[in-house]
Image: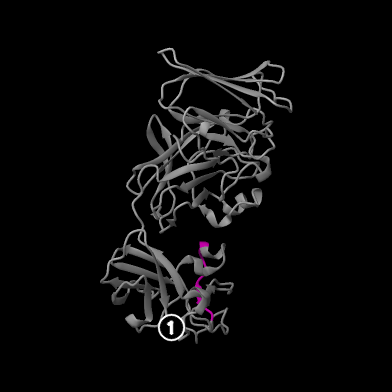
Amino acid sequence: VYYSDSWYQDIDKKDGGFSLELIDKQNICSEETNWAASDDEAGGTPGKENSIAGSKPDLTGPILTDAFLLSSTVLQLQFNEKLEKTLPPITAFTIDPALTISSVEFSDHALRQLTLSLSTPALENTLYNLAITSLFDCAGNAIQDEHKRTVFVLPQPAATGDLIINEVLFNPLSGGVDFVELLNVSNKYINVKNWKLANMEAGELVNERIITTTNKILPPNDLLVLTSDPEQLLSHYPQGNAASFWETNLPSLPDDEGSVAITDSLDNSVDYFLYSADMHSKLLKSVEGVSLERISLRGNTNDPALWRSGVVATGFASPGYANANLKEFSTVADEIKLEPEIFEPVSGQPNYTSISYKFEQGGYAANAKIYDAQGRLIKNLMNNQVLASEGFFTWDGDQDDGTKANIGYYTLWLEVFDNTGIVKTFRKRV
């Protein structure tokens, strides 16, 4: 018998002083479902009838819980219970697109894992469908129809920028928990097994935390929300996508400012974010329970213009689904674009406007200002700031004195110039 303390099914008794007892001695195949902590006041029943003896037959077939490629030619299958000792034939398995199976072997003493050797190597980033036509558990039950098919893929190594930090909650509500959301922006299937989260101090990684020691494939465009307590996170953000939540230990995420970094299994840097509470909207009365969200998947993660506070409509955070503030930009050369032209500060979705620009060359210095309908200056957005050839900046409806601008129309004035005397001026209404 290969046992673990989880078989006790009792938090107190597994700490010691109690034996594990078999429930149904006629059912020698079932393991954790047919064992539990002794109910005898002495803590066990050596030489006597088990205190929890009863009838508990195994009447259900096995479930295929996972299929993972250990290499391009080795596929490992995991089942929820012990299989019969006789190995299934090669013909019991079909793979589409076709891969030739050369052998089937047990890969563990508990008879819960099968290893399929492939004479045709699997291709990276290709989805394969596996179906099992005939397989039985130790008690002779056939595999359950609804659990005999799955999909597997040979993941690709990640490069810097393939996964990005997409959203961070570092100042949770009272009784709440932090989270860090990762987004796969590549076209790769990426395995985050043995990846780490960490803090950064003086350019060095500290407080490293392994995300998972098991295989976890993140498909292209998928999100992974890392948190210490998925249930608690969902209770505060019930609209969150719980299927994307993953329980793990997080590094320190202070409420005022801090850092979070991602590294792969070889400790290569994938992305990092230096955050501050000052990056939140100045119009928010409280930032407790408010996440910082990326507004664009492009650009340097540590560009403050890339981040906005979560919005009211989503409960101030969007764990596991597209950021409420997300916006991609398309601008022609020597033009600027405001999107949206109408917005509502703090409570709107989005609660800001983005000003995207594109020039034939970079290096222009820029001044950007907001004027009210009477022509009065209310906000300086830029003063002699050097611009790249393409980018964006934002306005969240605040004035220079920190208050929210009144409802109405405003004018964005943008002037760019270079050292040769070229000057370009743009005006847009918002």
Up/down of 241 relative to 419, above or below = below
Q: How is the image coloured?
A: one colour
What residue do we see at 43% from left, 67% from top? Answer: 151
Q: Position of residue 316 (x, y in %)?
A: 64, 41
Magenta-drawn stretch contains 19: yes
Q: Is-magenta flag for residue 115?
A: no
Dot 1: what SS? loop
| Quadrant placement of the C terminus | top right
The disc labelled 1 sits on which kind of residue? Phe
Label 1 crowd bin: few (<14), some (14–19), many (20+), radius 10 Å: many
- In the image, 266 versus 120, the foreground residue is 120
Q: Position of residue 313 (x, y in %)?
A: 68, 43
Image x and y of residue 171, in percent: 59, 37
Give the total of numbered labels: 1
* Lateral position of residue 271 relative to residue 404, left or right: left
Residue name at image x 40 percent, y 83 percent: 84
Question: For the magenta stretch, what is the residue range?
Answer: 15-23
- Front-most of 24 and 213? 213
Q: Nearer the viewer, residue 120 or 378?
A: 378
| Identity of the residue drawn at 64% across and 23% down | 411
Assign the N terminus to one quadrant of the image.
bottom left
User: Which residue is the site of mark 1?
Assistant: 136
Q: Nearer the viewer, residue 335 or 113?
A: 335
